[in-house]
Image: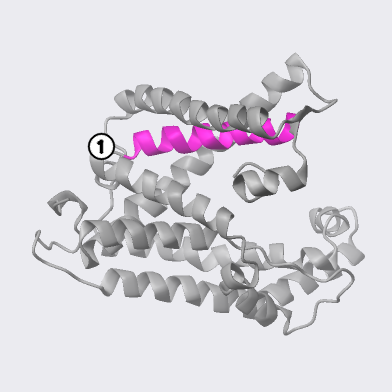
C-alpha cells in the first residue's frame, strides 16, 4: 500500500514523515489522565456535598445513583474535559478545519452511503449471533415484544449514529492521519488500531465499599492506563483491535468517513438490541468470543 497525499498532515508530501502529531496525541492523552487523577476526587466530593445540601437537585439525583465503587466513572468523564478543550487547537494545528477535509464529504450522498453500510454492519453482527445460536445457544428475554423491540432499535440507531459520527471523526479523521504522517501505511493502520482498542479497554474494578480519598484518582489513573495488563481479556482486546483495523482500511480505501460511520452505527444499534433481548450463558459466551456480551 502506497502513501497518499490527502491523508498526510502538516503540508508534507508522500516522502515526508513527522512524529510531532503522535507526540502531541500522547501529551493530550496522558495529560488528560493526569488531569482526571488530580481533579476527579474533588469533583466526586463536590457532587456528594451538593447532594447532601440539596438532595432534590441534579447532583442529588446523580449521587443517589453513584456509590463509591462508581468512582472510576467520575474519573472517565473528567478525563474527557481536557480532550474536548484540546480538539479545536488540534483541528487548527493539523489544518483539518472543515468537515470535507476530515472526511465528511458530500452530505447528501453520505446519507445514502451510511444507510447501505449500516445494513452491512447490522448484517455482520447478525451473522455472529446466528453462529452463536448454532454453536452455543441463547435465550429470549421476558421483556421481548414487538413495540419494545422497535423502541430499542430506534434508540440503538440514534445512539449508534451519535457515537459513530464522533468516534470516526476523532479516530479515523484525525488520529489515523497522525500515525499515517509519522509512518508507512500498514504500521500506521496497526498502531492506530491498537490505540483505538487501548482507549476503549478501560475496565477499572473498584472494591465494594472502599471509600474515595483525595489520592483515589491516582489509583484509578494507573489502573486505567495499565488495564490491558491488569485485566487481561485478550479476546476482547483483539476484537476491538480488529474493528479498528477494519475501519482504518475502510477509510483509506474509500477516502470518506461515511462508510465507517455506517458500519460503526450498525454495530452499535445491533448490540443495543441484542444485549437487551437475548441472554447467553456466561461460561459458553466466554469461550465463543471472550466476553459475556457481544462486543
- Residue 126, by quadrant, is top right
Could you tell me residue 163's position as x and y percent?
52, 43
Can the viewer see residue 78?
yes
Is 282 rendered above or below residue 12? above
Could you say which is closer to the camera, residue 67 or residue 63?
67
Count of labels shown?
1
**Segment colored magenta:** 257-277
Q: In screen coordinates, is 254 left or right of 228?
A: left
Looking at this view, name the residue that lies furthest to the top: 146
The percent position of residue 224, horizontal first and vertical second, equals 61, 71
Q: Position of 90 compared to 81: left or right?
A: left
Residue that mark 1 sits on: 254
User: Can residue 255 be spotted in the picture?
Assistant: no
SS at mark 1 in the image: helix
- In the picture as drawn, the residue positioned furthest to the front comes out as 135
Kindly identify the residue that appears in the image at 35 percent across and 35 percent down.
Answer: 258
Task: Estimate the x, y position of residue 108 in percent, counting from the top left.
Answer: 32, 24
Chief secondary structure of the magenta portion:
helix
Of 263 and 48, nearer the camera is: 263
Around disc 1, counting alpha carbons within 10 Å, would you say few (fewer than 14), some (14 to 19), or many (20 or more)? few
Q: Residue at x 61, y 79 (%)?
A: 222
Residue 45: x %, y % from top left: 79, 73
**Image point (72%, 43%), residue name:** 284
Return the residue nearer the eye: 31 or 126. Answer: 126
Question: Which residue appears at 70% of the width and 36% of the height?
Answer: 275
Amino acid at each position: 500500500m502506497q502513501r497518499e497525499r490527502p491523508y498526510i498532515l502538516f503540508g508534507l508530501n508522500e516522502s515526508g514523515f513527522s512524529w510531532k502529531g503522535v507526540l502531541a496525541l500522547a501529551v493530550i492523552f496522558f495529560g488528560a489522565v493526569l488531569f482526571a487523577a488530580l481533579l476527579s476526587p474533588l469533583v466526586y466530593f463536590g457532587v456528594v456535598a451538593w447532594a447532601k445540601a440539596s438532595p432534590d437537585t441534579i447532583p442529588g439525583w446523580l449521587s443517589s445513583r453513584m456509590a463509591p465503587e462508581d468512582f472510576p466513572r467520575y474519573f472517565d468523564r473528567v478525563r474527557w474535559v481536557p480532550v474536548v478543550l484540546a480538539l479545536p487547537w488540534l483541528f487548527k494545528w493539523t489544518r483539518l478545519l472543515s468537515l470535507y477535509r476530515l472526511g465528511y464529504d458530500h452530505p447528501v450522498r453520505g446519507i445514502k452511503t451510511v444507510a447501505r453500510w449500516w445494513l452491512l454492519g447490522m448484517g455482520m453482527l447478525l451473522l455472529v449471533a446466528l453462529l452463536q445460536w448454532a454453536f452455543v445457544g441463547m435465550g429470549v428475554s421476558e421483556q421481548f415484544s414487538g413495540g419494545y423491540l422497535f423502541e430499542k432499535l430506534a434508540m440503538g440507531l440514534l445512539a449508534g449514529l451519535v457515537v459513530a459520527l464522533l468516534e470516526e471523526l476523532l479516530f479515523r479523521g484525525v488520529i489515523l492521519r497522525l500515525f499515517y504522517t509519522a509512518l508507512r501505511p500498514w504500521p500506521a493502520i496497526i498502531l492506530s488500531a491498537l490505540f483505538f482498542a487501548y482507549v476503549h479497554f478501560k475496565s477499572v474494578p473498584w472494591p465494594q465499599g472502599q471509600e474515595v480519598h483525595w489520592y483515589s484518582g491516582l489509583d484509578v489513573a494507573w489502573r486505567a492506563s495499565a488495564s490491558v495488563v491488569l485485566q487481561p481479556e485478550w479476546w476482547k482486546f483483539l476484537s476491538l483491535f480488529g474493528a479498528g483495523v477494519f475501519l482504518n482500511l475502510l477509510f483509506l480505501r474509500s477516502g470518506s468517513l461515511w462508510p465507517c460511520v455506517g458500519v460503526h452505527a450498525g454495530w452499535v444499534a445491533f448490540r443495543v438490541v441484542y444485549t437487551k433481548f437475548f441472554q447467553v450463558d456466561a461460561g459458553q459466551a466466554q469461550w465463543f468470543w471472550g466476553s459475556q456480551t457481544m462486543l
